Amino acid sequence: MKKTLAVFCLSLFLLIIGCSKNDTIANPSSSSNGGISFKFDPKTVPEGVTLISATLTKANFTTITKNLNLLTDSTGDVSIPAIQVGTWHLKVDAKDNNGTIIYTGETDVIVQENVVVQLNLTLNPVTSGTGTIYIFVTWGTNNSGQWIDYGDNPMLTRNNNPSYPNAVNTAKIMYDNGIYKMWYDGLYNSAVASVWYAESQDGLNWNTIGSTPVLSKGSESAWDAYSIAVSAVIKAGNTYKMYYTGHQNYSDDVRTGIALSTDGINWVKNNTPIIGITPGYYHFNFTDMIVKDSIYYGYFCYTTSSNTTDGAIIGVATSLDGLFWERQIVFGPTLPWESGSVAFPTVIYESGIFKMIYQNTIGTCLGMATSTDGIHFTKSGDPIFTQSNTINGQYSIWYPNYRKIDNISYLFYTGENSSNEQSIRVARNFNN
């Protein structure tokens, strides 16, 4: 039986449209009209709800009501055009087959031009308990495929880690057996890092598992004696494979190692690195990996000089066993927003297309590129997400991790505020 309480995820987008002579809404004269559409996942609807009714009211304006019949409408979309800017009162009712309201909630929506806001609306069952509905409000000429920063960001901070590190960053996410799993770096003094593990039921609320790292630096004589950091985590059959970078000393360039696990928590390292320091491939770092048709595609970034991280380039390495790799260039910086460097690629494979999200190395923009073979990519042009799109004003954004789970696209990333505090965050796309 379905739960009587539920979480509704409702995305509400405001779009600038032209004024219509046939507009039936009695608004005062204004050149700033917009439209509302909202979308939700029907799978999250509690048992008994068959109709969603949204009503907008404003003094001296005609009341606007739109209904969505869950028995006849399969899209989960409702559109309300020609709404004037200003403050409107939104009331959302969830009704049963007899028209009885069994969930209800209301809030004010401030409709503004060129402003992104996010509202949280609680739908309260008429009988008992509560449910939550998330409402995302955005202005723009076209919101199709837009990434919306999660309103309760950050998801994970150093306060959520029992060792209280200086920062947490570089999240690698996997959805496995109904659980969202995260491996991330805890960063300490002198740039020493270790890998920690967290779990979530919804991909938004996370708990670090255990009181110690799941992977730490090696012994004094080991190749990873100084520090390690997670690069990519995949699952092949019943075996988890973690690729990670390691330093032998503070000034040493990184090498890449591999560790194996049967549960994602207890890991056994390979004694030697699988990729050593290679001239021409400095600061080499796998940042994501997928396996397709028994071929490993490991996406990485690197520089051609050991003295700088400027001019970073994205590449792909292919392998038949995940141990021996052949590397080649994917692309370098060519667009103005890339600011001379491209790095930290993250890739999913969907419907015959490799989709990559990557960043510039000044931490201001993320872009997208696509490919049919996983090697030759075409860039989309403009950034898809920038630090200005973040909730609570992040100064920079780093280390994207792109995943698509249950028809929702997730962009996990590290945010850094003006005080240089780093935390793990997420943006979502409900239409991509």
Image (spheres, helix red, strand yellow):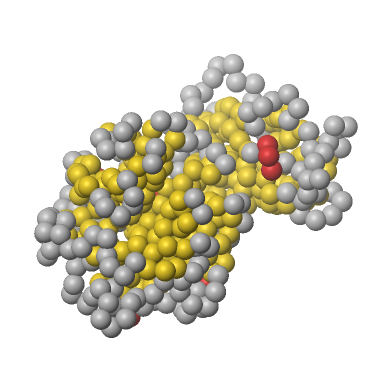
Figure quadrant of the N terminus: top right
200 sits left or right of 248 in the view? right
The residue at the far top in this view is: 22
- The structure residue drawn at horizontal position 52% and vertical position 72%, both measured from the top left corner, is 160
188 sits left or right of 15 in the view? left
Location of residue 183 in the rendering, given as x and y in whole percent from the top left corner: 45, 63
429 sits left or right of 383 in the view? right
Q: Nearer the viewer, residue 240 or 285?
A: 240
Would you identify the image quadrant in which residue 297 lies? top left
Location of residue 361 in the rendering, given as x and y in whole percent from the top left corner: 25, 55
Q: Nearer the viewer, residue 214 or 116?
A: 214
Would you identify the image quadrant in which residue 190 lies? bottom left
Location of residue 315 in the rendering, given as x and y in whole percent from the top left corner: 23, 47
25 sits left or right of 21 in the view? right
The residue at the far bottom in this view is: 220
- The structure residue drawn at horizontal position 46% and vertical position 46%, both measured from the top left corner, is 403
Q: Height in image: 247 above or below 124?
A: below
Q: Nearer the viewer, residue 357 or 224?
A: 224
- The structure residue drawn at horizontal position 54% and vertical position 69%, both measured from the top left corner, is 208
Location of residue 413 in the rendering, given as x and y in whole percent from the top left corner: 41, 56
- Asked if residue 96 shows in the view, the reply is yes
